[in-house]
Amino acid sequence: MRRIEARGVTMISQVAKKKSNEALGSGEETSPERLLSYQHLAEVGILFSRVHLRRMVKKGLFPAPVRISPNRISWRINDIKSWVRTRPIAG
């Protein structure tokens, strides 16, 4: 595996998991797997503080992050999209 970082979004390239771009919308895992840093969670509408996210992860109310290095964590975009789909619609 190799890690590619561009504009704060980390992508992990996996040779064995090549799929077409049409699978992106179906919720299936695709290669490369995209990871979102805390700063980029706002792009998908998650505006919680770091402390609140940590509490939610501990209670099992938010997807657990992936440790990229000793001082960096990110979330799998597929986990975040799944979590967003489970949220109630305001209205």
Image: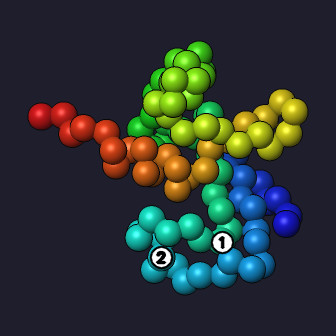
Q: Residue furthest front?
A: 59
Q: Residue at x 77, y 78 (%)?
A: 15
The alpha-carbon separation of the residues under discs 1 and 2 comes to: 10 Å
Q: Quadrant of the C terminus?
A: top left
Q: Residue at x 61, y 50 (%)?
A: 76
Percent x, y for residue 65?
A: 65, 38
Tell me, what colour scheme is on the image?
A: rainbow
Question: Relative to residue 53, is residue 89 drawn left or right?
Answer: left
Question: Relative to residue 26, is residue 41 drawn left or right?
Answer: right
51 relative to 10, above or below: above
Q: Residue at x 59, y 81 (%)?
A: 19
**Residue 17 quadrant:** bottom right
Q: Are marks 1 and 2 in contact (CB under 8 Å)?
A: no
Percent x, y for residue 63?
A: 54, 39
Residue placed under numbered mark 2 in the picture: 23
Q: Is residue 37 visible?
A: no
**Residue 5 quadrant:** bottom right
Q: Which mark is residue 41?
A: none
Instruction: Work out whether residue 12 or residue 87 is closer to the camera in this orientation and state it.
Output: 87
Instruction: Work out whether residue 8 or residue 54 is closer to the camera in this orientation and state it.
Output: 54
SS at mark 2? helix
Q: Quadrant of the N terminus?
A: bottom right
Percent x, y for residue 10?
A: 72, 52
Q: Is residue 51 visible?
A: yes
Mark earlier in primary sequence (1, 2): 2
Is disc 1 surrounded by few (<14), some (14 to 19) or many (20+) residues within 10 Å? some
Residue placed under numbered mark 1 in the picture: 31
44 relative to 70, above or below: below
User: Please, what is the three-letter code of the amino acid marked with disc 1?
Assistant: Ser
Question: Relative to residue 34, is residue 26 drawn left or right?
Answer: left
Percent x, y for residue 12?
A: 75, 61
